[in-house]
Structure formats: structure tokens, C-alpha cells
Amino acid sequence: MSNNLLQGKRGIIFGALDENSIAWKVAERCHEEGATFVLTNAPVAMRLGGIQQLAEKTGSEIIPADATSMEDLEQLFTQAMDKLGGPLDFVLHSIGMSPNVRKNKGYTELKHDWYLKTMDVSAASFHKTMQTAWKLDAMNDWGSILGLSYIAAQRTFPSYNDMADAKALLESIARSFGYWFGKEKKVRVNTISQSPTPTTAGTGVKGFDTFLSYADKMSPIGNAPGEACADYCVAMFSDLTRYVTMQNLYHDGGFSSTGVSEAIMDMVGGNE
Ligand SMILES: NC(=O)c1ccc[n+]([C@@H]2O[C@H](COP(=O)([O-])OP(=O)(O)OC[C@H]3O[C@@H](n4cnc5c(N)ncnc54)[C@H](O)[C@@H]3O)[C@@H](O)[C@H]2O)c1
């Protein structure tokens, strides 16, 4: 399905690791809609996934960059503009990682140097990305920048651990930088708060399958799949959403507005 919604638009897509990655699906959809873009991921991720395959499929170049390194980011934006032939219209930040989650350190016993790493990789990197784009004047007027979030920024999901704090910071950065980018360049900055999705980052969270099934039963429309998230990203990169900015946009089948569903009532036995 293509409506040429992104015809002529140029961008950078962070975070496609393998074909389950949300960023992978976004890249496929952006390609279908006529965009050209550079793919990027941490240098270590180059060996792990299949990003080369995605690059071939979408006719894209890969420029490795650690999103916590200002030097890497500066090179990335400079080279991307060079390869794509000018400033950018969209950026997707699809990055998350917590050493505490990975190594099973619960919220009441966090290792704090790991906590700082979580914040740096999963949230501050969004600021670093935008600061780099700002400094290099790398965004076209009416461009669109997106980060991906999760509802644990608003409500507690115990096993989401320190990633909840990172998402709260990520959403705040979207609002704060959205102000400056909006005033200066009419560039919009938003986060999309996505349903649980079976990806490498997602399944790293303890009890993910139960989590996924609970969210599905709580959401009137059901969990939003990664493919639908990619559609939403395309809409947010297109010219049809030019005045939506500084928002955290729920893409969750109604989960965030549901107190309890009949399916959950049945499960806990209170619906007789
Ligand atoms: N999967 C879910 O349930 C879910 C739900 C809501 C939001 N999200 C968010 O979506 C985004 C994408 O995650 P995903 O679920 O597609 O998982 P994923 O594991 O496929 O993607 C995470 C990406 O972050 C990259 N990354 C890690 N450290 C990096 C660094 N230093 N520099 C550059 N890149 C780095 C990884 O290489 C990987 O490509 C994340 O922000 C995640 O928190 C995921």
C-alpha cells in the first residue's frame, strides 16, 4: 500500500536491529511511501542483526553511530545530508536499553552507574540527536522528529524498572526541544507511546508474555502491532500532521483510557 505520503522526503532512522524491530517496520513503510533515508545503529549492533538486508531492500546506506556520542552523531548527520542530497525532513529515534533490566537488578536495588547508562542511551540520546541536528541546521522547515515511548512513563509497571524513568525523561525532552524546534524551524517533536511489542528490547522485560497478554485483554481494539506503529510514524512524518507537536501520542488500542475490561473482570472472577 502506497500513497506517496513521503515522496521526496529525506530522513534518518535509528534502531533497526532485526525484522522484529519497530524501526525496521518503519523503514519498510517509509520506503514504500517514497522516502529516502539513512539507517543507523550502534556499531556493536552491526554484527548482531540483519541491518544490511534492510538497507538492500530499501536502497539505503548504513552509517553506524553510538547515539550517546556527540562525535558519532555529528558525523552521522553530516554524512546523511551529504548522501541524501540536503537537509532532513524526518528523524526516528527508536532506541532503548537498560543494563539494570538486562542484568535483573530490580528497581529497589539499582546499580546507579547502570542507571545513568539507561538514561543516557534511552533518553539523553534523544536530546543529543536533536542538539546535533539543531547545531548543524540539519532539519528542513516543517520537518518531524519522533521518539518511541511506553505508558510506564505515566503509570507503574514494576518489571519495566528504570526504563520507566527513562521514558518519562524522553517524553519531557520531546516537549522541551519541541518548543525550540517549533519556534525556530516549525519542526515538530513528538513521542509515540506504543503497546507492548515482541522485539529484542521488549522481550528483555521480565514477564513480557504475561504483560503482552494482559495489555491485549485490557485494550478494546487489542495491542497495536509494530506494523501499525510504522503506519502511525509515516502519518507523523507526512504533511498531514504539521501542527501536532510536543505531544505524547498513545498508540495502544485504547489501553491508556481503559480502567478495566470485561476480559480482565472474567479472569479475576469478578464478573458473575
Ligand atoms: N517493544 C516494546 O514493547 C516497546 C513498547 C513501547 C516502546 N518501545 C520502544 O521502541 C523503541 C525501539 O525498540 P524495539 O522494541 O523496536 O526493540 P529493538 O531491540 O529492536 O530496538 C532497540 C534498538 O536500540 C538500539 N540501541 C541500543 N543502544 C544504542 C546506542 N547506544 N546507540 C544507538 N542505538 C542503540 C539497539 O541496537 C536496537 O536497534 C525503544 O525506544 C523502545 O523502548 C518498545
Image (cartoon, rainbow, N blue to C red):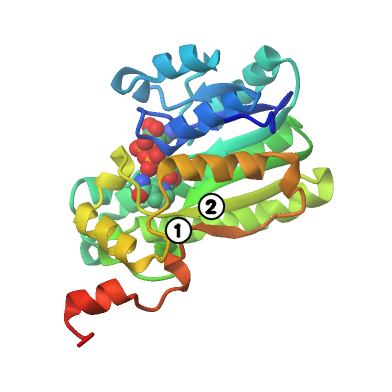
Q: Where's the C terminus, which quadrant? A: bottom left
Q: How many marks?
A: 2
Res 211 quadrant in image: bottom left
- Name the residue type under label 1: Asp
Does 1 sit above or below residue 121?
above
- Label 2 CB less than 8 angstroms from ligand 1: yes
Q: Which residue is mark 1?
A: 252
Res 78 quadrant in image: top right
Q: Where's the N terminus, which quadrant? A: top right
Taking the image in four quarters, ligand 1 sits in the one at top left
Whole-number angstrom distance, CA of label 2 to CA of label 1: 9 Å
Residue at the image position 26 percent from the left and 74 percent from the top: 264
Q: Which residue is mark 2?
A: 192
Q: Label 2, secondary structure: give it.
A: strand
Circle 2 Cα neighbour tier, 10 Å, few/some/many (<14 / 14–19 / ≥20): many
| Picture coordinates of residue 181, whole percent (x, y) | 75, 47
Q: Nearer the viewer, residue 201 or 198?
A: 198
| Left or right of residue 84, residue 270 in this image | left
Circle 1 Cα neighbour tier, 10 Å, few/some/many (<14 / 14–19 / ≥20): many
Does 154 sit above or below residue 212?
below
- Label 1 CB less than 8 angstroms from ligand 1: no
- Name the residue type under label 2: Ile
Question: Which comes before the other along the chain, label 2 or label 1?
Answer: 2
| Picture coordinates of residue 182, whole percent (x, y) | 78, 50
Residue at the image position 47 percent from the left and 72 percent from the top: 257
Residue at the image position 44 percent from the left and 30 percent from the top: 24
Q: Label 1, secondary structure: give it.
A: loop
| Picture coordinates of residue 39, whole percent (x, y) | 52, 23
| Picture coordinates of residue 163, whole percent (x, y) | 36, 55
Q: Nearer the viewer, residue 17 or 222?
A: 222
